[in-house]
Image (cartoon, coloured by chain):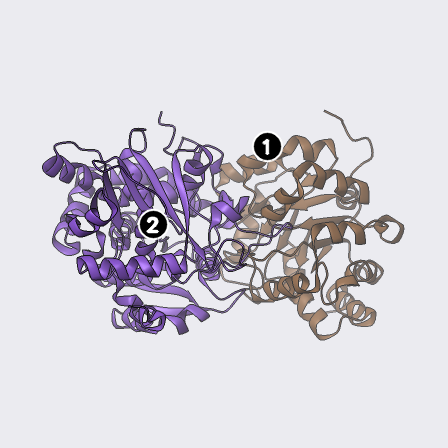
Amino acid sequence: MGKVLIMNRIDQVFRNNRDILNVYFTAGFPDLDDTVRIAKSLESAGADMLEIGMPFSDPVADGPTIQESSQKALENGMTIQKLFDQLRDLRKEVSIPVLLMGYVNPVIQYGIENFCEKCAEVGIDGIIIPDLPMSEYLENYSSVFQANGIHNIFLISPNTSVERIREIDEKSGGFIYVVSSSSITGAKQGVQDGQVEYYKRIQSMQLTTPRLIGFGISDKETFKNACSYANGAIIGSAFIRQLKEDASDSGIKSFVRNIKSKSP
Amino acid sequence: MSKYHVNEKGYYGQFGGAYIPEMLHPNVEELRINYLKIINTEAFKRDFDHLLKTYVGRPTPLYFASRLSEKYATKIYLKREDLCHTGAHKVNNTIGQILLAKRLGKSKIIAETGAGQHGVATATVCALMGMECIVYMGEIDMARQKPNVERMKILGAQVIPATSGSKTLKDATNEAMRHWINNPNDTHYIIGSVVGPHPYPDMVARFQSVISAEMQNQLQEVEGRNTPDHVIACVGGGSNAAGAFYHFLNDEEVNLIAAEAAGKGLNSGKSAATTSLGKTGVLHGSKTILMQTEDGQVVEPYSISAGLDYPGIGPIHAHLFDAGRAEFYSITDEEAMTAGVELSKMEGIIPAIESAHALAVFGNRRFEKDEIVVVNLSGRGDKDLETYIKWGKY
């Protein structure tokens, strides 16, 4: 197996930073050609990592906000091929880690080897496919991911068993995506009952893989709360709402700065 | 190990599996570990058989359709699932799953429905067991199938419109899965067909397999042999077909025939003939054959029959198709409606339009004079009266 000599950008960020802000947005939303502009804008505003959503017609793990942005992106004509075309010069413009997030069916249709090779070519560092189960990944996908130096990011939820978390920790690269509550994206607002207990339980397991908390992280308060129990957090639906309201560079900047600002 | 039943990894050949987000893993895993243990206990079997007999009205008759047989010059039997309580085979599965849910300690039930038949069958068993019931139904389907929406409400269920995507069955299924992600602890999801992540396809097929088990006994009685030469069933997701084929899967002497909905024709862009128009993909938790764009977006299917209006098929059927174990026919709206009216006039049975697709196979294929052909008449046509009236050619 080809060992990748250059350190993955995700690993570099976790080595050097804390309170990492990872921002999700849907490719091709609000306009088809917004993808790279938004990525650049997020980096210059201070985001530490980016997660670009590949829209799917049937996103079962997503709430209404991301469903709607996905549908709009598909109507705009977004496809995986289109996305790779847009990202061709990504690494001339953006230096922070970039992940792709999407559902397994479009990736299968694109061809898994083709997909991973393209990711490596344009400089994608990790992939999140929520409906690709760990067993399936390990059996049929992991060698292709590894050959291309791409981290596959696993999710855990409050109901994931301790043994399974240990196994995920062992098999993970990059970070573990800690789903904040039993929910789809954007479903619950604010800090939920029992959530801090769950975060502490995971924290006390002393996993070797870094952790980012996501789902329901929407503002400075929930971000700060998540950061005190993990390496950082992921904001998705709240940023999509921002884009719906104001997708300009200044709108994006103030959104990110507001979340990252040190003042109370 | 049987070639056509599910293997220990949850696959039928290359199809099946459990492609679900991690948030659903504990629920599906709980089911996977427990379903066979529970449904194979004597106590479960006793409760299941008792309800099927005294509540559903089983065994359903195997009726020799003499006039239809004469017309098509073969021996045609109808397996009368249309006589089940609630009007279709769907209730076999909902009885099984609610008994299972109770034994898993769940207090709430969710379901998806397209035409409303599975929703009604779920609302019915929830009323029977005094369990809370939420049914997701596409907003468009709710408008098309108003009487079934009201039936569910009378039975005490809450019907929630699915307003995402195309607002039909696939979106209702998405919404039910999202609900389950949001409520993992006290809720069981009763999937209505042989679709979804493993173990659902196998579990639903087992509950529906009572159909072919009864066929065996009934054929033995009237024909002195316990196998037919052909079994015909319609396939949307494919639960009635899975039940009708189940005990004959390994007997290659029995020819299995699946009727899919071609809608307005295979090349019309308004069709639900998955095996003709689809390719391998992943939807609703399993790898199967799926109608989709080149980019892997799921295509909205069309059929005059709301119960066949699904962009995929159960992984078991994808495998039967792939392995050449079953013959697949695409039946147009026109052919199905004609066959439905024909059965009404010749045998005094108004079939569900889904089941009429199975009957339309007689117009597409010849059978030998002394062959025994069993058609699974999966449901009755009361719910489709408006469609028959609109059709008008009777």
Callout 1: SS = helix
Judged from this view, the residue extending furthest toward the right is: A92
The correct choice, above or below, for A251 with respect to B15 in the image is below
Dot in front, 1 or 2: 2
Three-letter code for the amino acid on which mark 2 is drawn: Gly
Instruction: Read off the residue under disc 1.
Output: A140
- How far apart, in angstroms, are the residues tagged by discs 1 and 2? 44 Å
User: Which chain did the renderer colour brown?
Assistant: A
**Residue B32: assigned label:** none
Chain ID for label 1?
Answer: A
Instruction: Read off the residue under disc 2.
Output: B363
Chain B colour as displayed: purple
In terms of image quadrants, where is residue A27?
bottom right
Callout 2: SS = helix
Residue B370: horizontal and vertical position, in percent? 20, 36
Q: Are marks 1 and 2 in contact (CB under 8 Å)?
A: no
Q: Is residue B109 left or right of residue B75?
A: right
Residue B366: horizontal and vertical position, in percent? 32, 41
Three-letter code for the amino acid on which mark 1 is drawn: Asn
